[in-house]
Image (cartoon, rainbow, N blue to C red):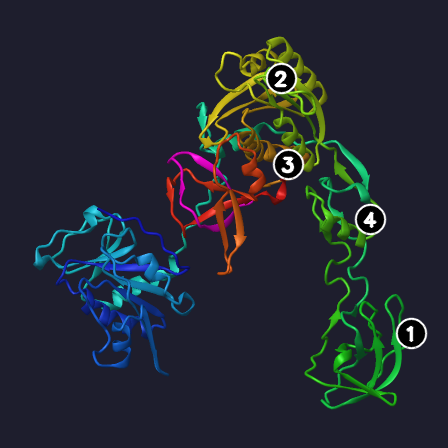
Amino acid sequence: MSIPFTNPLPIPVLGFCAYSGTGKTTLLKQLIPELNRRGVRLAVIKHAHHNFDVDIPGKDSYEMRKAGAKQMLVASHVRWALMTEDAKDGDPELPHLLKQIEADKVDIVLVEGFKKLELPKIELHRAAHGKPFIHTHDDNIQAIACCDDTELPSELRRLDINNVAQIADYVGEYIATWQPCPVDLPMAPTCGCELDTSTTLSVRQGIDKILSYVKPVTAIESVDLDELENRVLASDAISPVDVPQHTNSAMDGYAFKLSDTADASYKMVGEVMAGHAYNGTIANGEAVRIMTGAPLPAGADTIQLRELANEQDGAVSFEGDMSLGQHVRQAGEDIAQGATALAAHSRLHAAEQGLLASLGFGELPVFKRPKVAVFSTGDEVCQPGEPLKANCIFDSNRYTIKSMAKKLGCEVIDLGIIQDSEAALAQALKDGAAKADIVISSGGVSVGDADYIKTVLEQVGQINFWRINMRPGRPLAFGQIDDSLFFGLPGNPVAVMVSFLQFVQPAIRKLAGEQNWIHTMVPAITDKPLRSRTGRTEFTRGVYHLAADGKLHVTTTGAQGSGMLSSMVKGNCLIVIGEKDDQLNPGDTVYIQPFADLL
């Protein structure tokens, strides 16, 4: 039985496997010096099948380890060695062992043994031994080093087991052509060929199908600088000036022309403040006081900090190392005149507004805001602020949807709560489509007798009704009503928010003019076991934090019911468990979607 293997290092790992007596160790003892001679830096991991010991009984290190030290590190000016007591019932774990390698100091790791692992290997074979081949049941065999009497399939790379130079050539080729495996992100964009017409889709297929229907807004309006927050730029913002406009001082200090003489003293000839200029030219041996942001006087090329200067009797000398051009900001080093300061289709926030202000823009062209109409369905849904009817619930979904849409820069139209009747729903859909680019409802997209959305949408527009392989939020209705898009989201409050984040958000961003936006995925280490079902994407509410080890860690918010809005309030991210995973253990890497963008 093969055992899955993932290389945790940014360098290649290559195994050597064979039956006992074939000569693995003998070959490696010849191959290692040959690779060293060629400049290849090596690390080697050997699987020992018995209770080995590399320390010497009676030595201090041996006695301290046997006395109970879990780890014993012995070091000299020549080498160091770390012995770790880590008793296991089964074989040692190669990924854990590989993490102990200083990957920045070697080019490849050669592994002897571990033949059951699914890692790339060279098989060693001698026909005279009469042993079966390993490659017949191991697809990870890259080449076979064998003797002349061995017969091999033509598709396998053949190496001479007695030609160490040839095997070294192959290892060199392997290093040169090796590529790390791409990170397998949950919901990663596809090539598009995966789309089909089935009624059950992956999350990625659902996103791609929806985006294929979205046509970005083309209408443009000119908007004052103060009103640009969360708008999308319609054309490139070309800088009319250099930023900074003048070569200037990055520090309070003294400006001068750097002398070759380390202990030079400079004559003080003036002072230049920010917003003013020095009208003369600095000659050799002269200096001026200068404030941060003040233009560098002609003739000066260097600035020394005020705290490293000694000014006395009209002259100044400097302490510390100095280099030509230090603490000088060149004109245009941030943005040159005529360069693109911000590209079209950029979403504008505080930093972008500040940048545009620094260039002197008073207004800019942006795409018009998308309009989003929102309503809730169900006779059991009551308006907040009014008395709660028997057997009913207050409407929360409409408010979470409106808030998220507003944060995406949309103009929101609230159509209220629509009763459970085909006529009322049909009228709401028509009204929404007449007023908005997107119509969003919540509830009424399951298979209940009173869930009319699907039926009504087929009457007034076009419908795609999907089941998405995800939790929470499996049912999703999507379609068109005239020129408007329609989203029918689930009824459970958490499912509504998760579905909005995954499907409605990318549609709104594309509609608004943003190009190539994708969900933010950040790696984190889970502190709790996580379970899902293979073939389904799970969105678990989580809390991430920077731990003492300097890495992001994440844990769940607790109970994960799809009606528990408190789990979204407690959380600051979604933990995304991909379709390939059914069990993640503490210490495993997961991917999270931080709430910072929208919630």
Q: Earlier in the sequence, mark 4 or mark 1?
A: 1
Which residue lies at the image location 22% right of the left edge and 81% below the top edge? 58
In space, the residues marked 3 and 4 are separated at their CA atoms by: 25 Å
Mark 3 neighbour class, 10 Å CA radius: few under 14, some 14 to 19, many 20 or more: many
Q: Looking at the figure, which quarter contains the C terminus?
A: top right
Residue at mark 1: 279
Residue at mark 2: 389
Question: Nearer the observer, disc 3 or disc 1?
Answer: 3
In space, the residues marked 3 and 1 are separated at their CA atoms by: 52 Å
Q: Position of residue 2 (x, y in %)?
A: 24, 48
Amino acid at circle 3: Arg
Task: Looking at the picture, tell me which residue is in the foreground, 144 or 444.
Answer: 444
Task: Looking at the picture, tell me which residue is in the foreground, 518 or 471.
Answer: 471
Q: Is residue 536 magenta?
A: yes
Residue at mark 4: 361
Q: Find numbered disc 2 in the image and state the secondary structure of the residue it sits on.
A: loop
Q: Which residues make up the magenta segment?
A: 519-541
In space, the residues marked 4 and 1 are separated at their CA atoms by: 30 Å
- Confirm whether residue 190 shows in the render: no
In space, the residues marked 2 and 4 are separated at their CA atoms by: 54 Å
Q: Earlier in the sequence, mark 2 or mark 3?
A: 2
Q: Position of residue 311 (x, y in %)?
A: 82, 86
Residue at mark 3: 509
Lateral position of residue 286 relative to residue 21, left or right = right
Q: Earlier in the sequence, mark 3 or mark 1?
A: 1
Amino acid at circle 2: Lys
